[in-house]
């Protein structure tokens, strides 16, 4: 039996979810919700949707839809908590775009609610389903890079500039998730420094900024909603602004960092450095891990060669390289002629291997895994709500470090 799904949000990512669920044999798109009627019309035209698919401008219009079992949320980050909580309380399984929520308390609340309702809470950390990340994890686990030294990542582009989160919350979660997965560790210390660039009046970066008083009013309404015991029977007036960019935003948009530098320190001493910016004309999606025996490079902007293994050791002597020289250096038996030890030579980093990957869209794997979790009602360890909570814990600590001017902090 096909799983009935409603997709909330018909923007760039929502369209991709709609496409994948329409093409999947185990799902049936029952409704698409977006406050923008033009977006709904574009989706209807693009996919030639059957008349049975409901196109709604308000989530309340489909909450009690017959046959609905799951909800996919692809709306601004500030709305994720509200929409996910409402869907879970209605008894639906939830697939939410990252981040699950904008603070740790809300993320934990959603996990607890999903457990109470015995429903699956699945977070779309798409990169963890990328074939390059799978292959890279195997290479690292097989110690093909030797002793890991450090890592670095660049995730930059020129717009879109978000109005509900800064560049840290918009971009960093991808690279943090990949580093954690490849290292099978979580950071014990984090640090972030950032810059807010002045915006010109009337630019896209400031055109939707609300008055601080308006944001405060929205926050008060939201707090009142949360204080209700259940809130299952929310009326349209309570949720008509769910997709508003400023909902739950802590600062006006001009205070959101456009450029952020992140440092992650792991238990074994490995450090990862991440460059994040949404006002950079050079679009980058590149992550590198350097080891004593080689370097692994994941470059999404090189579709023909997204994963490269650069073999070779630039060091003058590590235990991985010098076991033979070490054996020669052992004291010779009594009476034997001492063996002359030859100094180890620098190895050239000339062997470049383009790694073959399975040709599959990562989001297709996300949708397939989510549907499987719904069918079996079992969580996905990679993208469960609990796994997302740990990433939000790191992001929350990085935000605090950012506020403190780059002070190193232990994730709390």
Image (spheres, rainbow, N blue to C red):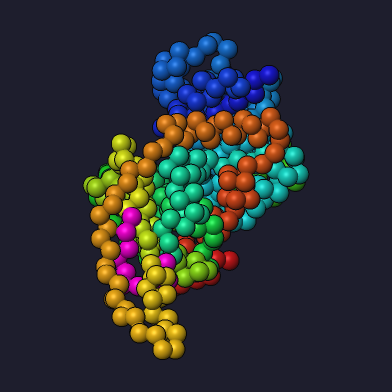
- Residue drawn where x is 38% and y is 38% of the image: 356
Q: Is residue 326 visible?
A: yes
| Whole-percent x, y for residue 287 in the image | 37, 52
Give yes or no for residue 371 being in the magenta stretch: no
Judging depth in this view, the residue of 321 and 241 nearest the camera is 321
In which image quadrant can residue 303 be found?
A: top left
- Seen in the picture, residue 289 relative to 21 is either above or below; the reply is below
Q: Is residue 401 above or below residue 227?
A: below
Q: Quadrant of the C terminus?
A: bottom right
What is the magenta range? 311-320
- Magenta run includes residue 317: yes
State the residue in front, 207 or 169: 169
Q: Is residue 206 visible?
A: no
Residue extending farthest to the front is: 335
Place residue 263 in its image quadrant.
Answer: bottom left
Q: Nearer the viewer, residue 312 or 340?
A: 340
- Left/right placement of residue 310 relative to residue 86 reads left
Expressed as whole percent of the image width and height from the top left, the position of residue 192 reads: 41, 65
- Residue 84 sits above or below residue 46 on the image: below
Identify the residue at horizontal 32%, vertical 69% (top origin): 315
Q: Residue at x 42, y 81 (%)?
A: 330
Q: Quadrant of the N terminus?
A: top right
Return the x and y of residue 283 as percentages of the image width and height. Answer: 28, 45
């Amino acid at each position: 039996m096909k799983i009935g799904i409603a997709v909330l949000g018909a923007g760039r990512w929502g369209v991709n979810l709609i496409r994948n669920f329409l093409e999947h044999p185990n799902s049936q798109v029952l409704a698409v919700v977006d406050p923008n009627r033009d977006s709904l019309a574009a989706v209807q035209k693009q996919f030639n949707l059957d008349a049975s698919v409901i196109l709604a401008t308000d989530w309340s219009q489909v909450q009690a839809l017959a046959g609905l079992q799951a909800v996919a949320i692809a709306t601004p980050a500030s709305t994720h908590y509200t929409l996910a909580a409402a869907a879970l309380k209605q008894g639906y399984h939830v697939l939410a775009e990252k981040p699950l929520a904008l603070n740790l308390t809300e993320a934990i609340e959603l996990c607890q609610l999903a457990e109470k309702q015995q429903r699956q809470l699945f977070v779309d950390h798409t990169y963890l389903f990328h074939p390059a990340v799978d292959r890279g994890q195997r290479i690292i686990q097989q110690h093909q890079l030797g002793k890991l030294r450090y890592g670095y990542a660049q995730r930059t582009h020129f717009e879109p500039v978000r109005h509900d989160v800064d560049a840290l919350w918009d971009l960093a979660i991808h690279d943090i998730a990949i580093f954690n997965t490849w290292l099978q560790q979580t950071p014990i210390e984090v640090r972030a420094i950032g810059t807010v660039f002045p915006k010109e009046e009337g630019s896209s970066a400031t055109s939707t900024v609300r008055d601080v008083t308006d944001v405060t009013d929205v926050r008060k309404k939201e707090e009142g909603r949360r204080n209700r015991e259940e809130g299952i029977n929310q009326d349209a007036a309570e949720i008509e602004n769910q997709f508003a960019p400023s909902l739950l935003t802590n600062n006006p948009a001009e205070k959101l960092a456009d450029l952020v530098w992140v440092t992650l320190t792991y238990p074994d001493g490995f450090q990862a450095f991440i460059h994040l910016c949404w006002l950079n004309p050079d679009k980058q999606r590149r992550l590198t891990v350097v080891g004593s025996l080689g370097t692994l490079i994941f470059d999404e902007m090189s579709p023909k060669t997204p994963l490269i293994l650069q073999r070779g050791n630039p060091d003058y002597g590590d235990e991985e390289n010098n076991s033979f020289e070490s054996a020669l250096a052992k004291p010779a038996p009594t009476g034997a002629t001492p063996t002359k030890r030859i100094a180890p030579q620098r190895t050239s980093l000339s062997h470049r291997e383009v790694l073959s990957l399975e040709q599959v869209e990562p989001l297709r794997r996300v949708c397939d895994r989510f549907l499987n979790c719904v069918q079996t009602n079992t969580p996905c360890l990679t993208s469960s709500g609990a796994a997302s909570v740990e990433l939000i814990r790191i992001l929350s600590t990085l935000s605090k470090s950012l506020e403190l001017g780059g002070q190193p902090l232990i994730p709390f």
